[in-house]
Amino acid sequence: MRFISLGSGSRGNATLIETAETRLLLDCGFAARELERRLAQLELEADTLDGILVTHEHQDHVRGVGPLSRRYRLPVWLTHGTFRSGRLGHLPEVRMIHAHQPPFRIGDIQVLPYPVPHDAREPVQFVFRHGAARLGVLTDAGMITAHTIGVLEGCRALLLECNHDPGMLARGPYPPSLQRRVGGDLGHLSNGQAAALLKRLDHAGLEHLVAAHLSEKNNTPELACEALTEAVPGLEPRLALTHQDQSSGWFEL
């Protein structure tokens, strides 16, 4: 199994996960045409996707989901709350999931949804498994829960939100109400919260840690890397960053 971030940040998020048999898109916060362009840079076509999984209904995660699914007749897996938000428009094939259900399969990839605290209707994140390879994804969460730690334990790769530095957020351009939302228990993980999560996980088998959803106004790559590497000595060779305007490169498991 391998994965690649097609872009991550407040202006759009999309991640591709694939095996030799199955290709899944996690979120599509870019316009369908832009997503097609980014796939074409990888010499891939959207009609080779086996489906789209959606974490929640915020625009930076769903902007292109409806158009892409209608254009290519792609099934979409999402929670009832996300579906009921009405932000995805008509979907030709809906596969309803919920946050506490057992793992299910899409092709040869096992998918486990799990709940996260975020200010959306019914947000979920996912763990993907193929054989011994496990990829955990955690973005768009305001705090770390015991359940989150249990779900992510033992992952060989982790795509982890490092949204903001609290000092930059407090001094930044956001109005106080938005600062409270971003930094609150239903907002986004700070660098320090992401680092604290890492400390509580057994990271001996962690091959890839990919820092995601960095704010362009309230964070820097240097601050995110500093927080993570201080939490886990020797992490540097396994650490990578996503970018808003370009793909990350493939991560193999």
Image (spheres, helix red, strand yellow):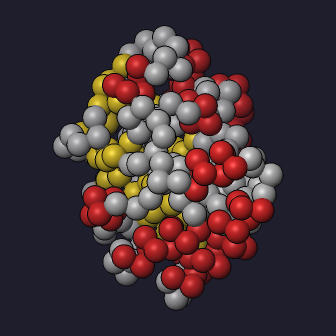
In-front residue for pair 47/224: 224
In-front residue for pair 9/84: 84
Give me the residue at 38% from left, 48% from top.
116
Residue extending farthest right: 173
Quarter of the image where the N terminus is located: bottom left
Look at the picture and state if 201 lies above or below 45.
below
Look at the picture and state if 37 lies above or below 66.
below
* Residue 208 visible in the picture: yes
Residue extending farthest bottom: 233
184 sits to left or right of 6? left
Give me the residue at 46% from left, 14% from top.
91
In-front residue for pair 171/22: 171
Q: Quadrant of residue 38?
A: top right
Residue 83 lies, in percent from the top left, at 41, 22
Residue 235 lies, in percent from the top left, at 53, 81
Q: Quadrant of residue 13?
A: top right
Residue 221 lies, in percent from the top left, at 71, 67
In-front residue for pair 98/210: 98
Residue 133 lies, in percent from the top left, at 34, 61
Look at the picture and state if 84 lies above or below 17.
above
Give me the residue at 35% from left, 30% from top.
79
Q: Quadrant of residue 146?
A: bottom left
Quarter of the image where the C terminus is located: bottom left
